[in-house]
Amino acid sequence: MKKVYADVIQFRNTHYDFGYMQGELIKDSILLKNRERQWLVRKPLFRIDKEETEQVFKKLAPNIWEEFIGLQDALKWPIERVLQEFGGYRVNINPSGCSIYVGDDYMIRNYDYHPKTYDGRFVLFQPTDGGFSKLYGSWAGTIHTTAYFPKDLEAWIVLGGDQEPAKFSFSSWLKGEDLSLKTIEGDIDTDIPFAHMERADWFK
């Protein structure tokens, strides 16, 4: 059993500033060091065409492109590297079991990331420029589960299974009241390293 945590990140501003803030948070983190090490083992099976990618994002999700530019500026990386790490490009990996369950008054989302790729973040973002964005070898375990109740404007999150969720008023947060939570903690039955907490050995 391993004690794990997820940081609670709250932000209100433009999409560019949101990207920049995230870049500042992660630029010296173990998460980024672990992501860099994964490319020693995994080889990208894709080619990034910067112009084509920019056109697609600017057409379908222009605010997400602004987040990438903010990340690029904070990390001082070429845009191709930002896109490789955060643009949705993937290498061939075994499928996971993420799932969504929706009813009239709720939505529950399971995040079955592999610990070596889990970023350990629960992010609340209120943009000021419009539009809300946003088996052990393969990992079949749930890392965190969130629940949203739109009628009550309440949200829950829990790390691991069989534990009480952290609950908060999304309505109050939207009105400008910050959450008192800085991290969420839970227990997960694994000895696999979590990318945001400890060094991950990509050769295992």
Image: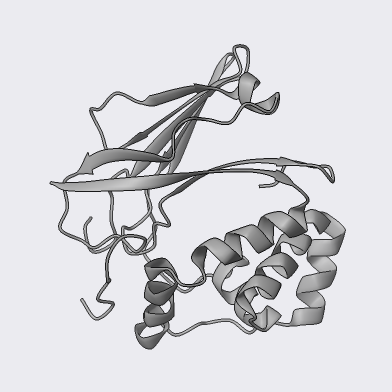
Name which residue lies at 85% across and 63% down. Answer: 58
Residue 69, visible in the rendered structure: yes
- Name which residue lies at 63% across and 12% down: 151
Find residue 49 and report its horizontal and vertical position in percent: 73, 82
Judge by depth and name the residue closer to the eye, 53 or 164.
164
Image x and y of residue 83, in percent: 64, 73
For the image, the number of numbered tags is 0
In the image: residue 17, left or right of residue 154:
right
Vertical placement of residue 79 versus 149, above or below: below
Visual colour scheme:
one colour
Horizontal arrangement in the rendering, residue 33 relative to residue 103 (left or right): left
Kindly tell me whether residue 64 is visible in this rendering: no
Q: Residue at x 40, y 76 (%)?
A: 33
Q: Quadrant of residue 64?
A: bottom right
Q: Position of residue 105 (x, y in %)?
A: 57, 14
Percent position (x, y) of residue 192?
A: 20, 61
Q: Is residue 1 left or right of residue 135?
A: left
Query: The C terminus is located in which quarter?
Result: bottom left
Which one is in front, 182 or 146?
Answer: 182
Q: Residue at x 67, y 60 (%)?
A: 19
Of the pair 196 and 81, the residue shown nearer to us = 196
